[in-house]
Image: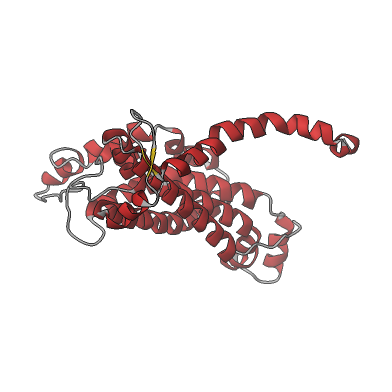
Amino acid sequence: MDKLLRNKKAIVIFMAPALILFTFILFIPILQSVYYSFCDYNALTPAKFVGLKNYKGLIQDKTLHIALKNSIFFLIYSCVTQLIMGLFLAALLTNIDKGRNLFKNIIYLPCVLSSAALGLLWMFIFSPKLGINQLIQKFGIEGPLWLMDTKGFIILPMWVIAFVALWQYVGQSMMLYMAQISGISKSLYEASYIDGCNKVKSFRYITLPLIRPMVATAMSLNAIGSLKFFDMIFNMTEGGPNHKTEVLATHLYQQGFKYFKYGYASAIGVLLLVLCLAVTLFINKVVKTEPYEM
C-alpha cells in the first residue's frame, strides 16, 4: 500500500474520474454562472455583456432584500436549533439501551423522505380550513392563518416553515453527533464518574470537547442547507403571500425559470455561493477544533 501511495501515476489514475466529474458537473457550471451574471441573457438570444448591471439590480431589488432576510433567519434558526436538538437527542439516545434503534430510525426517517411531498403534506396540515385549524375549532378556538399571516418582522409562515425544516432534518444532525459520541472511549466516562462527575458534567467536560470537530461539520452542513433551502418552502407557499416567504433559492428560481432572466438569476446564484463560502469559513473559524486521541 505504501508503495502504491508513492506512485504518482497511480494516484493520478485513481483521482482522474472524480476530478473529471467534479470539473464538468460543478466547476464549469459555476464559472458559466459567474460569466452569465455579467450578461443580459434569456437563453433564446446570445448573452450580451452588461458589466455590473445585474449586481446593481440586486441592491435595488426589494424582493431580494426580503429573500436575503428570510435566508439569514433560516441560517441562524437552523444552526442554533439543529445544534441544540441534535445534541440533546444524540446524548439521550446514546444513554438508553432499549428502543434506541427504533427511536433513532423514527427521528431520522423524515430526512430520507421527499421534501416536496412533505411540503405538500404540511401545507394541508396548516391549511386555514383543514388540519390543525379544523382540530382546534372543535374546542371553540379559531386558528391563525399559519401560511398567510404577514404581520411582524419575521412573519408567522416563516416560523412554521422553519419548524417543519427542523422536524425533517434534525435526524441528520443527531446521527452525526451519535457517530462521534460512540467513538469516545468509555474509560474516560468511567474515570470521570470515579472522580465524582455526574452525567451532566461528563457531557460538558468530556463529550462536548471531543465532538467539537463534528459540531463544526454539522453546523456547516446546516448552514449551507438552510441558505439553499428551496423545495419545501416552494411547495408550502411558493414564496407568497406577496413574496413575503421568498428565500434566495426561490427568488433565483422565479427570476430564472419564470421570467427567463438567466443573467440576473446567475447573479443571485453567485451571491448565494459567496454567502455559503463565507458562512462556512466563519463557522470553521469560530468553532475551533483540536485533535484528540480517544
Q: Nearer the viewer, residue 114 or 6?
A: 6
As displayed, is residue 18 above or below residue 84?
above
Where is residue 288, by image quadrant?
A: bottom right
| In the depicted structure, whether residue 94 falls above or below residue 122 | below
**Which residue is pictured at 45% across the width and 56% down the height?**
79
Farthest residue toward the right?
A: 3
Tell me the residue at 71%/31% (across/down).
16
Disc count in the image? 0
Residue 3 lies left or right of residue 233; in this view the side is: right
State which quadrant residue 207 falls in: bottom right
In this view of the protein, can residue 22 be seen by the observer?
yes
Expressed as whole percent of the image width and height from the top left, the position of residue 28 reads 54, 36
Horizontal side of 88 relative to 133 (left or right) equals: right
The one of 121 and 95 positioned closer to us in this rendering = 121
Closest to the observer, 31 or 45: 45
Left or right of 255, for residue 136:
left
Position of residue 221 relative to residue 111, above or below, is below
Residue 141 on image: x %, y %: 11, 51
Where is residue 30? Give x, y as percent. 50, 40
Name the residue nearer the viewer: 58 or 148: 58
- Point out residue 274 in the picture as x, y percentages from the top left corner: 48, 53
Q: Residue at x 34, y 45 (%)?
A: 164
| Extreme residue in the left direction | 140
Q: Residue sitting at 15 percent across and 48 percent down?
A: 145
> Is any atom of residue 121 visible in this view?
no
- Quarter the C terminus occupies: bottom right
Tell me the quarter of the image containing the N terminus.
top right
